Amino acid sequence: MKSGLGLVGVLVLFATLGPWVAGQDPNLSDFVRGVDGQGLPVGPGAAHWLGTDGLFRDELARLAHGARLSLAIALLSTVLSTVIGGVVGVVSGYLAGGRWGWVDGLLMRLVDVMLSFPYLLLVMAVGAALEQTGPGTVLLVLGLTSWLGTARLIRSKTMVLREQGYVEAARALGQRTLPLLLRHIVPGVVGPLVVVSTIGMASMILAESVLSYLQVGVQPPTATWGRMLYEGQHGMTLQPRLVLAPGVAILLSVLGFNLLGEGLRDALDPRQAR
Amino acid sequence: MPPGRGGALVTAPTLLQAEHLSGYFQVGGGFFRPRKVLRAVDDVSLRVRRGETVGLVGESGCGKSTLGRLLLRLIEPTAGRVAFDGQDLTLLSAEELRRLRRRMQIIFQDPYSSLNPRMSVRDIVGEGLQIHRMVQGRAALEERVAELLQRVGLRPEHRERFPHEFSGGQRQRIGIARALAVQPEFIVCDEPTSALDVSIQAQIVNLLLDLQESLGLSFLLISHDLKVVEFMSHRVAVMYLGRIVETGPTAEVFGRRAHPYTRALFSALPVPDPARRSLRVLVEGDPPSPIDPPAGCAFHPRCPRAQRGRCDVETPRLLEVTGGSGHRVACHFPEE
């Protein structure tokens, strides 16, 4: 949990302060100090701390701007998927088996259908269909396709909660459905929601990178980690640092969010002895 | 202690009347399994008068709790009607029912799951007051909650606390305060004492009796504890597999035990007299499944008095044992 928090903290710092520290335009080719004697991008040095990429742009600046974009997309799409998954899960779980059970049936069959597609294929198909993709479309695509697992989890959690005596007591008191859900069900699913959304952040970062790598994500020249990975692979044998830099960044942030999520799960689970 | 409480309140007006009430559930029904019908409550008629306690006894799974929830329409009945103070609950719209809920409440068996662990006692007890706008303003709510807590034997400063800070008995008192908050006339007490220590049980029983006396409440007391039912109830109904098999004034039913099943229930009680031990009537086997209840009298496979050709064919009707006693039994061969 602590190492996860640390990694995520460093990532957030890097995304917020990094572009300012790097101090260079991520999309500007430096043909003066960014090129070495043989016409290749320079390695790490004073002018460019992490060297320049294939188009002689500052690698650190691109990494930092990419962090900002990747994190923003991951955060917003996670929020979107958490909200959709949470609402669908609570509604579905509360209505399951009752007079409005068909609503639950409909929603869950929709989830089944969407889950039966390989996740990335679905994302890519939507991404490809939208042709001109910007950060906004990417986060929408990610958010709209990733709430399925959350919905299932929250549905089962809701079905446990609604059998509690206090929910029946609230019904017996004449509580309306919406206030009943907000007072008695939602507070009980917040814990699991926080955990799945934290771990969800990790898969969002990964998914966004994959999209960019496959060039169905954010369009060039905008820097994202996946895009950098794609651009770096051409010179991978000569200059592995151009693949390593975004690769390590992705690895550490995914690891960080996963560790944090698992830590939160243990901390929020009352059955787990600490 | 003489059984029952001073006979039935024959003159009091009827508050709640259920007629031919049934609650069926569909079970199973996967891709390859056929759907089956579980008859949790089957054709039950019941009346509760004002100020009266009606005890409902029977072994676990016989449909007692389901019947309690059907009476409050917390579960939708499959058939039959329930009249509360002359209004047919089954015909009310959702909004009308919501308003009527103020007048009928429920107390739960499990004092742990029946209180929301994330809410303070003030919010738990005050929920009904807010729903039905029974108090104006924060100060009035605080005052009313304090009053209710005192009424059930807790202290006003307990308002700030959360359920986990209380013992089982105290939690049960909080649950009772929540039900009382909306000034109900009828309360379903679903096994109110069975999750509690014996010493605490007596306190809760006395609290309920005290509240009934001072507020004129009517209770449906669901319990498998015959002693508690005997002590609290004016009338009792014995349930077996979703049906009422014997009903009447507590003293009559518990004294005569006309249905073989009632006898069997009583024989399961430990008798603190070694000389009387040998009188036990043992019921054999488990109760049959309410999914495929036996034909005829549902009790016949376990009944010592069952006769072939009659009990396994014809369902006995609930008939008066002796005229005018109000003591009715559903048995072809009732005990004398």
Image (tube, coloured by chain):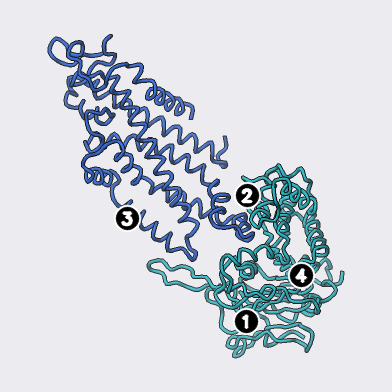
Give the CA distance from mark 2 to mark 1. Answer: 43 Å
Label 1 element class:
helix
**Circle 3 residue:** A113
- Are the residues under badges 3 and 2 in a single subunit? no
Give the CA distance from mark 3 to mark 2. Answer: 36 Å
- Are the residues under badges 3 and 1 in a single subunit? no
Residue A193, placed above or below residue A259: below
Give the CA distance from mark 3 to mark 1. Answer: 50 Å
Which mark's residue is nearer the viewer, 1 or 4? 4
Q: Which residue lies at the image location 38% right of the left edge and 67% below the top edge?
A: B31
> Mark 1 belongs to which subunit?
B
**Circle 1 residue:** B300
- Is the residue marked by circle 4 packed among few (<14), some (14-19), or many (20+) residues within 10 Å? many
Residue B129, placed above or below residue A48: below
- Are the residues under badges 3 and 4 in a single subunit? no
Q: Are marks 2 and 4 in contact (CB under 8 Å)?
A: no
Q: Amino acid at mark 3?
A: Val
Which mark's residue is nearer the viewer, 2 or 1? 2
**Circle 4 residue:** B53
> Mark 3 belongs to which subunit?
A
Q: Amino acid at mark 1?
A: His
Give the x, y percent position of residue B322: 78, 88
Residue A84, placed above or below residue B31: above
Give the x, y percent position of residue B33: 41, 69
> Mark 4 belongs to which subunit?
B
**Circle 2 residue:** B116
Quadrant position of the N terminus of chain B in the picture: bottom right
Give the color of chain A as drawn. Answer: blue
